[in-house]
Image (tube, helix red, strand yellow):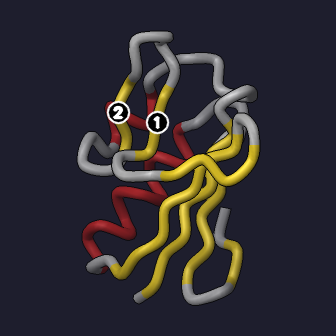
Amino acid sequence: MHVRIEYEHDVCVGTNACAGADPKHFEILDDGKAHIVGSKEEKPEKWAWEGDVTDADLKAILTAAQACPVNAIHVIVDGQKKI
């Protein structure tokens, strides 16, 4: 399935919950905030990554997005927003 992850860097408060839940797709940068591994900045402070993932990867991505206390991570699956 095709997944798009959108991340609002300026909203992130640095709890590191996403990286703890899914270190394959999220990492913590030197500023203490999260980053989507392999993502690109599309707008100032707005990053995105797109690709095809397995069911296991999707589960981990959704878990990471749900763990974010400020809803800085958005997940779109096959064109439909999930989080």
Cα separation between marks 2 and 1:
5 Å
Q: Nearer the viewer, residue 82 or 46?
A: 46
Q: Residue extending furthest top?
A: 31
x and y percentages locating residue 15 in the rendered image = 52, 18
Q: Residue at x 69, y 44 (%)?
A: 46
x and y percentages locating residue 43 in the rendered image = 74, 47
Characterize the local packing of mark 1: few (<14), some (14-19) or many (20 or more) Cα atoms within 10 angstroms. Answer: many
Q: Which mark is residue 51?
A: none
Check the image and report above or below for 23 versus 48.
above
Secondary element type, mark 1: strand
Q: Quadrant of residue 14?
A: top right
Q: Residue at x 37, y 41 (%)?
A: 26
Q: Amino acid at mark 2?
A: Glu
Query: Which residue is under mark 1?
Result: 35
Q: Quadrant of residue 78?
A: bottom right
Q: Quadrant of the C terminus?
A: bottom right
